[in-house]
Amino acid sequence: MPSPTTIIGLEVHVQLQTRTKIFCGCANRFNPDEPNVQTCPVCLGLPGALPVMNRRALELSVRAGLALSGTIAGLTKWDRKQYYYPDLPKAYQISQYDLPFCQGGHLDVDVEQENGEIQSRHIRLIRVHLEEDAGKNLHDESGRGGDSRVDLNRAGTPLLEIVSEPDIRSAAEARRYLEEIRLLMVYLGVSDCNMQEGSLRCDANVNLEISNSANESIRTPIVEVKNLNSFRGVEAALVYEISRQQREFEQCGGIYADTAKQTRGWDADRGVTFAQRGKEEASDYRYFPDPDLLPVSFSDEWIEIQRAELCEPPADRRRRFVAELGLSEYDAGVLVDRGRETADYFEAVATACGDAKQAANWVTQDVLRELNEREETIESFPIDAQGLASLLGMITSGDLTTRSGREVFSSLMNNQGGDGSIVERIASIVEERGLSAVADSGALETVIDAVISRNEKAAEDFRGGKDAAIGKLIGEVMREVGGADPNAVRETLISRLRP
Ligand SMILES: [Zn+2]
């Protein structure tokens, strides 16, 4: 029997990084500690309050749509989606129904297959639309019958919904797709995509195509898993749901009493999905055009202005780092996935020092290690790109050994070398510690001869075959000539003692 085909489509919600909410002047800011302070008659849904469209939200939305290769509509409008819920005081959500601002589009993601090969997957999009977020209901979960509360700080936050075709074929692929959307939105400055704060969430539609005993292709009923808010959660929920549907198919033999779409929640603690209320159909929402908001038309000129604001997408940047700068796929991935600022920093170092591979080694290892240890971002990194490039330049030209370069690097990290620019501080650290590489090999040999004559016993031991005895001699030479290359010292000592 052929193995089942997994069919997944994702609806990704991205909160836009605007200063104010979508239809009012309230601050758009995550603020759970002071509930209901970022509210006004508009986002509280008080009678007579009128929404005013936030221009910035439209700009960011259209940029996101263009970056996803979608077609921006000439005319778009706003619709009311009616439902009652305590976190939605108007009893309708302003959304987009039949004329979303963006249709089509796609995102290509590289996905590691089970055999370890990387496969590029083309995920098509159905549409991208803009809507307002609801507030938040907070329920007492102690089981002691406490209060439920409503916080409307989030009500009216601009929310982008990116709807994919059911082109995703595994839980791992769904995770990669979501990771790539997140990175793209962060690169574009469309959203901070902070998942802990709920700025990026998704719903996953999943079902399976399985052959039954008569070799007929049967599709299991579609399940929508709601409100997934972590990469791990998306992957784990889908893995669980795929095997649950498979078990259910085996039990019923592909004959289902109810084939309607189901809605399920994800319980991360127990690692299971669970049945929720039945899913409403579009007709249940009684969509109609919002009479308070004018439709919006975009001119071609305006769309081109937005296009000019786009940056190089992360996927293109990874490819360019490999093709033009000669980096490994792995290093290119580490640098780009870390965020736009880190990729910019690396590129500035690579350009200034003229050695992209060396720049990649130092940024992926030394710089990222320091950032991780300090829990800081590249913007606050104490060594600027020009400074690191000049240090790497000294190593390339042979003025510093790699070992001394590392010593200078850590001295810079510890704020040593005075108050000047990074380049001045490097010079003073090299000077102070005598790290300048010994260009004159004659000078090195003089020191080596002196060390040998002061350490007759160790020299004799080494001549007699005790290899370990050379360590003491190398150590003494290195103490005297701080900038010496330990390998060169070792070789010179060996050629002296065992000619
Ligand atoms: Zn408001």
Image (cartoon, rainbow, N blue to C red):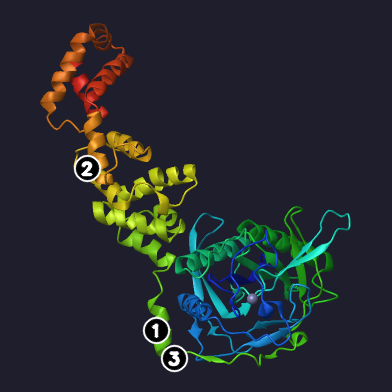
Q: Position of residue 239 (x, y in %)?
A: 68, 59
Give how far apart the Cα atoms at labels 2 and 1 are. 44 Å
Residue under the image location 62 percent in, 61 percent down: 197
Mark 2 near mark 3, Cβ–Cβ under 8 Å? no
Residue that badge 1 annotates: 304
Residue that badge 3 annotates: 299
Q: Please, is residue 260 above or below residue 444 in the view? A: below
18 vs 333, nearest the viewer: 18
Residue 423 relative to residue 38: left or right: left
Q: Residues within 10 Å of mark 2 (few under 14, many from 20)?
A: some
22 vs 266, nearest the viewer: 22
Q: Please, is residue 142 above or below residue 181 in the view? A: above
Residue 426 relative to residue 68: left or right: left
- For label 2, the SS is helix
Quadrant, the N terminus: bottom right
Q: Residues within 10 Å of mark 3 (few under 14, many from 20)?
A: few
Amino acid type, residue under disc 2 in the picture: Met
Amino acid type, residue under disc 3 in the picture: Ser
Residue under the image location 52 percent in, 78 percent down: 61
Quadrant, the C terminus: top left
399 vs 356, nearest the viewer: 399
Give how far apart the Cα atoms at labels 3 and 1 are. 9 Å
- For label 1, the SS is helix
Residue 263 visible in the picture: yes
Looking at the image, tell me whether mark 3 or mark 1 is earlier in sequence order.
3
10 vs 30, nearest the viewer: 30
Q: Please, is residue 172 above or below residue 72 in the view? A: above
Q: Quadrant of ligand 1?
A: bottom right
Residue 443 relative to residue 76: left or right: left
